[in-house]
Amino acid sequence: MAVAEIFGYKPSKLETDQLILKFGEDIYGSRCMKLAKFMDAMSEKLMKSDEDQDIRHTFMAFDSQCRGFLTVEDFKKAVGHVAPHLPMHAVDLSFRELDRDGDGRVSYKDFEFMMKYNLAEHI
């Protein structure tokens, strides 16, 4: 599993045991995993990790005050940087859609849901 760590992913002992149990083979009395099976097992995990990290970094960039949530002002400021010609009423509407519980704040959970839902539609 040292190879996985090179790519920034450190599986737990339980996860390592599960991977070897599922994808491993008995070779000369030891449970081993061939490179092709290892690559198959890890590629999905690494892609998900990259996606989660990208979402987290994007949220942190929007949350300039490090409060753990976004206000409509935070949202307008961030959108103003990346899409300055977008009408403010469209930004307000988008914010209201993101604010699923209507508390005037977009939590990380709401933001993550939107990003993953949006990504899933376009894949």
Image: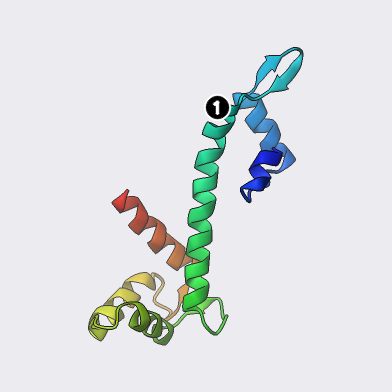
The quarter holding residue 24 reads: top right
Q: Residue at x 30, y 74 (%)?
A: 94
What secondary structure is marked by label 1?
A: helix
**Which residue is at the front of the view, 6 or 31?**
6
**Which residue is at the front of the view, 78 or 98?**
78
Q: Which residue is mark 1?
A: 36
Looking at the image, is 53 positioned above or below residue 105? Answer: above
Looking at the image, is 74 positioned above or below residue 29? Answer: below
Q: How is the image coloured?
A: rainbow
Q: Residue at x 50, y 79 (%)?
A: 63
Q: Position of residue 78 (x, y in %)?
A: 40, 80
Give the residue type at disc 1. Answer: Ala
Looking at the image, is 4 positioned above or below residue 26? Answer: below
Q: Position of residue 31 (x, y in %)?
A: 72, 21
The quarter holding residue 115 reads: bottom left
- Furthest-right residue in this view: 29
Q: Is residue 20 left or right of residue 79?
A: right
Looking at the image, is 38 positioned above or below residue 30? Answer: below
Q: Position of residue 17 (x, y in %)?
A: 70, 32
Near mark 1 (Cα within 10 A), the count class, few <14, some 14-19 or many ≥20, is few
